[in-house]
Image: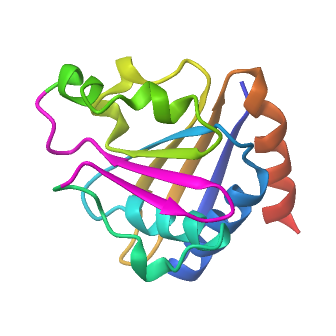
Amino acid sequence: MERFFYEAADESQTSQLGAALARVIPDGTVVSLCGTLGAGKTRLVQAIAEADGVDRHEVVSPTFVLLHEYAGKRPIYHFDAYRLRDEDEFQELGPEEYFESGGVSLVEWAERVVGCLPRERIDVRIEVVGETSRRFEIEARGARYEEPIRRLKQILAD
């Protein structure tokens, strides 16, 4: 299982991580995003979407609507499970249709709906370590994502 840790001192480094992730993840990827309130989940989604050609200011947390779709180089599906009561409520959104499409699915508060996520995915855990600094743990769940995570490490090391 390929795992990578990234320390971001500020939002610009979070943006670098998001841009690098957008470069390496294949179409059809599901990315689970876990972290406390204010950890930077939506900021990372903005950076990924921006790297795929979406205006960053269009990307907002879908907490109240549960799902936003963005049209970039490929479709981006931005889920937020924060307000869901249970996994059944998430299933009502029909996530498998999005997960099986050629787009990228980004799921905030994924720990609340982990049973609904595909076995093969990329997990991103975000920890607040300072006022502007964050620690990201990025893990490949499944062989399909091992190489993209290795490439991510290389890009961010350069």
Left/right placement of residue 22 relative to residue 114 reads: right
66 in the magenta segment: yes
Q: Please provide percent x and percent y for residue 79.
A: 36, 47
Residue 8 seen from this side: no
Quadrant where the N terminus sits is: top right
Residue 30 seen from this side: yes
Residue situated in front as seen by the camera: 6 or 74: 74
Q: Please provide percent x and percent y for residue 114.
A: 37, 24
**Splitting the image into 4 quarters, where does residue 157 fall?**
bottom right
Residue situated in front as seen by the camera: 22 or 6: 22
Q: Residue at x 78, y 64 (%)?
A: 156
Q: Please provide percent x and percent y for residue 66.
A: 25, 48
Q: Please provide percent x and percent y for residue 94.
A: 35, 28
Image: magenta residue range:
65-85
Which color mode does the image show?
Answer: rainbow
Quadrant where the C terminus sits is: bottom right
Q: Residue at x 80, y 52 (%)?
A: 153
Residue 97 higher or lower than 109, as above or below: above
**Splitting the image into 4 quarters, where does residue 113 fall?**
top left
Left/right placement of residue 130 relative to residue 6 reads: left
Q: Residue at x 57, y 28 (%)?
A: 100
